[in-house]
Image (tube, helix red, strand yellow):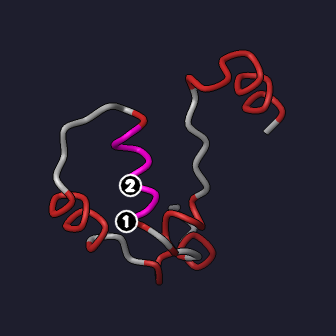
Amino acid sequence: MTRARDLKEQYGNEILELKYEVLLSEPFRVLTRVVEFCDLEVTREQIGGAAGRIRPNRAYAFCGDSAL
């Protein structure tokens, strides 16, 4: 995390910081931020479709799967 913080300080607003937990709990809001940050032309329906594919129940899947 130290390296990530250093990069954030160096590049400031050129880096979008995301938290996986927030993506899982608020996918539409987070994906909207990503789209805006990247200046993409995407409809709300497309964002909603992508957000609908995010499965919050996978949050701790790595705990039970050594391959992850």
Q: Is residue 4 above or below residue 50?
A: above
Question: Would you say 35 lies left or right of 1 here?
Answer: left
Q: Is residue 51 left or right of residue 5?
A: left
- Give left or right: position of 20 versus 11: left
Magenta residues, dominant SS class: helix
What x and y, as percent, mark residue 67?
51, 62
- Which of the 4 quarters of the picture holds residue 39? top left
The span from disc 2 to disc 1 (Cα, nearest Å) is: 5 Å
Question: Is residue 67 found left or right of 21 in the rendered image?
Answer: left
**Mark 1, residues whose alpha carbon is within 10 Å: few (<14), some, or many (≥20)?**
some
Q: Is residue 1 above or below residue 50?
A: above
Give the farthest residue toward the right.
2
Badge 2: residue crowd in 10 Å (few <14, some 14–19, many ≥20): some
Q: State the residue in front, 39 or 64.
A: 39
Q: Are marks 2 and 1 in contact (CB under 8 Å)?
A: yes
Secondary structure found at label 2: helix
Task: Look at the image and give the residue range highlighted in magenta.
Answer: 28-36
Q: Secondary structure at mark 1?
A: helix
Mark number displayed over residue 31: 2
Q: How many marks?
A: 2
Is 46 situated above or below 63? above
Residue 31 falls in image quadrant: bottom left
Q: Residue at x 36, y 32 (%)?
A: 38
Q: Is residue 56 magenta?
A: no
Residue kind at label 2, given as amino acid type: Leu
At label 1, which amino acid type do we have?
Phe
**What residue is drawn where x is 63% and y is 75%?**
63
The answer to if 30 sits in the magenta stretch is yes
Residue at x 77%, y 23% (from the top left corner): 9
For label 1, the residue is 28
